[in-house]
Amino acid sequence: LSDWLDELRPLGFENIPLQTVVEEDFDDALLWSFASGFDDNAPNINLYQTSDFLRKDLLLAVGNADEFFPTVAAVLLFGKNERVAELLPRSNVTVARFSGENGNAQLIEAIEVKGNLHTQYESILAFIKRYADLSKDRPKRKLELVTNAVVQPRAVYHYYSVAEAVINALIHRDLALREIRTRINIYDN
């Protein structure tokens, strides 16, 4: 079964086991809230050990009963925020707001978002919400009486489109590449 699963799951950076990670490096609350989402009626869900659950059920760790080597994906998904930043510093995301419409604009604020994927997702969306309105409804077309406004109104974007873009930026990045950092820039337009 292991050989068959290895054929299905090609070796990628996220599948590499990390030898310096221990069970205490994982956020148990995050892991078990994720696990409880599968089956609320599972009688033995609280009897699982973190290492067994990651290894046997999620296939995010390797090793036998005495060894525990979680993968990069396990750390990114369920690692404690401070440990993710230490173990995988390239997983940090820079989010910046610029005053202007292009790369020559002045920087207003920039933050380095660290932690597991859930923390990064929530932090990035919170940063975006500070500078743009996110609406879950379809934008309505407004009648503009003045064509050259002195003050530009805040941008309004579709919440689900922005959320999907953030998810794609986090999931599809290649952490194996050293020189390519993940960044999100917000401009006036």
Image (cartoon, rainbow, N blue to C red):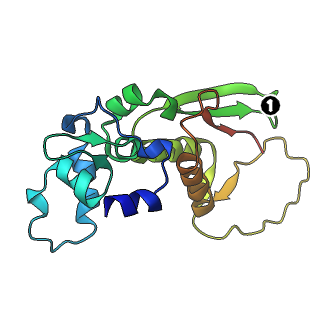
Identify which residue is drawn at 82% across, 27% down: 104
Quadrant in which residue 14 is drawn: top left
Residue 39: quadrant of the picture: bottom left
Question: Vertical placement of 132 versus 91: above or below?
Answer: below
Residue 141 left/right relative to 24: right
Residue positioned 68% across, 40% down in the render? 186
Residue to which mark 1 is pinned: 103
Q: Position of residue 119 (x, y in %)?
A: 40, 43
**Helix, strand or loop for disc 1:** loop
Q: Position of residue 182 (x, y in %)?
A: 60, 36
Quarter occupied by the C terminus = top right
Side of 54 where 184 appears, left or right:
right
- Where residue 95 appears, x then y in whole percent? 59, 35
Residue 40 location, quadrant: bottom left
Q: Residue at x 13, y 50 (%)?
A: 49
The one nearer the camera, 109 or 93, is: 93
Q: Is residue 51 above or below residue 80?
A: below
| Residue 178 higher or lower than 123, as above or below | above
- Camera-side residue: 95 or 107? 95
Given the image, on which type of amino acid does mark 1 rest? Gly
